[in-house]
Image (cartoon, coloured by chain):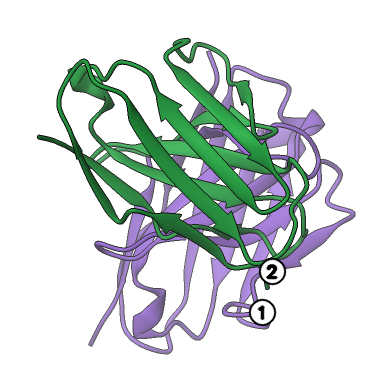
Chain colours: A green, B purple
Amino acid sequence: EIVMTQSPATLSVSPGERATLSCRASQSVSSNLAWYQQKPGQAPRLLIYGASTRATGIPARFSGSGSGTEFTLTISSLQSEDFAVYYCQQYNNWPLITFGQGTRLEIK
Amino acid sequence: EVQLVESGGGLVQPGGSLRLSCAASGFTFSSYSMNWVRQAPGKGLEWVSYISSSSSTIYYADSVKGRFTISRDNAKNSLYLQMNSLRAEDTAVYYCARARADYGPFDYWGQGTLVTVSS
């Protein structure tokens, strides 16, 4: 099983500032990496797939980068609605799909 | 508009059974692979099961293999999860999720249905 490790567990950032979230895979997942946003009481929402492609309707302030084992989600200028939990997911190793444990992005 | 609506959750005793349903609309259901993903209270996401568009390929997480059965009815635009021999650790919100491509990420999710296994 590929273990996905996200850091930090909690990130405190002020509105308008940049947030950088990291995700590391225990072995290469190529570019088969997705990022999801989840707000309290809601289902996850796909933000990024293929490590760097924004999903439909996702604002340009969200960007993803990386390949292999190291990945980054960057939110360029935080809006109030961006404070949530973010999960990375590898889908390279079907059927052993795995998610990271999540990064909570909170208002500083 | 793509919609996925889960139902069938509830309180069940350990060892009991439950059948979850997911009603799909707004897209050609028969063309997409589907998944079940769960989230224990206050915890992260865990993939549970996958079924291809024609039901020819099915996968399960080791944690549910032999106890859960995924199925679909393309004529009814519906996805199912039959859960038997339920354990306390199966307590979670269960989401159905559409795969963007056959083995791709999950681009649409339902709102989830809560399954509580407790005596």
Q: Chain of mark 1?
A: B
Q: Amino acid at mark 2?
A: Tyr
Is there any visible trace of residue B100 in the rendered image?
Answer: yes
Residue for badge 2: B60
Residue A14 pos. (x, y %) = 15, 26
Q: Amino acid at mark 1?
A: Lys
Q: Chain of mark 2?
A: B
Residue B94 pos. (x, y %) = 43, 55
> Which residue is rendered at x = 44% and y = 11% of the image?
A59
Q: Are marks 1 and 2 in contact (CB under 8 Å)?
A: yes
Q: Which class describes the residues within 10 Å of circle 1: few (<14), some (14-19), or many (20+)?
A: few
Element at label 2:
strand
Disc on res. B65? 1
Same chain for the residues at labels 1 and 2, yes or no? yes
> Which residue is rendered at x = 68% and y = 73% of the image?
A1
The vertical placement of A42 against A94, above or below, is above
Q: Nearer the viewer, residue A2 or A7?
A: A7
